[in-house]
Image: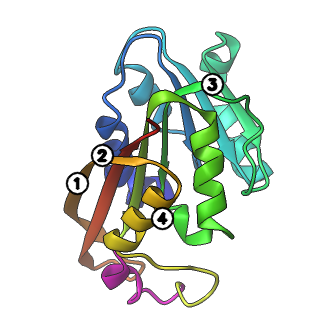
Amino acid sequence: MMHASNIGMTTSAIDALNLQNNDFVLEIGHGNGMHIARLLSKAENLSYYGADISETIIAEAEKINQDFIDNGVVQFTLTDGNKLPFENGLFDKIFTVNTIYFWENPGAYLSEIKRTLKPNGIFSLCFADKSFMQNLPFTPYGFTLYEVEKVKELLKNADFTIKNILNKTEQVKSQTGEQIEREYHIVVASAE
């Protein structure tokens, strides 16, 4: 269900990366990974790394992407949501969708993301707008909601350079089955 409700946002975040041949790509919070085949088709010889805080979701993503794992182009890593267990400057591109709400210390985590990006690497941060999220019944419990200006400020404070901001709306199905409009943003920044 989460894959279906988030695929539009995930696709937009991936497209914003402008993937190039031989890129090393990190996704933070990959979910079940059903979108990874599509991502890998965007350029030649991509290397995909997924990082998630859930052993259960990693096991599901590994099952769905076993062929890619066997071929050495995909790997998944369990993280604590605060540190990324990767070397400095490993990734050309990093993206995340709907995870910022759960970051304990957004400034520190953005610095950690920047640490793992190559110089001039690209980070695509996708999230639903606070105006949409605050109307959902579950967001009062453990979510920190954001407007685009606050996210821009966090990125600038972590020494990212904002390259582009894409504002989008899409129709999604609510838990009660009705169609609702979701406004979301993709903030594209570089580690210059």
**What kind of element bears circle 1?**
strand
Q: What residue type is labelled 2?
A: Ser
**What kind of element bears circle 2?**
helix
Relative image position of residue 24 (x, y in whole percent): 54, 22
Calculate the distance from the C-alpha at mark 3 to the C-alpha at mark 1. Answer: 26 Å
Name the residue tied to disc 3.
Answer: 90
Residue count near mark 3 (Cα–Cα under 10 Å), binned few <14, some 14–19, many ≥20: some
Q: Is there any visible trace of residue 1 in the rendered image?
A: no
Calculate the distance from the C-alpha at mark 1 to the C-alpha at mark 2. Answer: 9 Å
Which mark lies nearer to you, 3 or 4? 4
**What kind of element bears circle 4?**
helix
The coloring applied to the image is rainbow
First in sequence, mark 3 or 2: give its number: 2
In the rendered view, would you say 118 is above or below 35?
above
Tell me the quarter of the picture where residue 165 sits.
bottom left
Relative image position of residue 88 (x, y in whole percent): 68, 30
Residue count near mark 4 (Cα–Cα under 10 Å), binned few <14, some 14–19, many ≥20: some
Which mark lies nearer to you, 3 or 2? 3
Name the residue tied to disc 1.
Answer: 166
Name the residue tied to disc 4.
Answer: 154
Q: Which is nearer the eye, 87 or 181? A: 87
**Prevalent SS, magenta region:** loop
Name the residue tied to disc 2.
Answer: 12
Q: Is there any visible trace of residue 52 in the rendered image?
A: yes
- The residue range painted magenta reads 129-138
Relative image position of residue 162 (x, y in whole percent): 33, 49
Calculate the distance from the C-alpha at mark 3 to the C-alpha at mark 4. Answer: 22 Å
Q: What residue type is labelled 3?
A: Leu
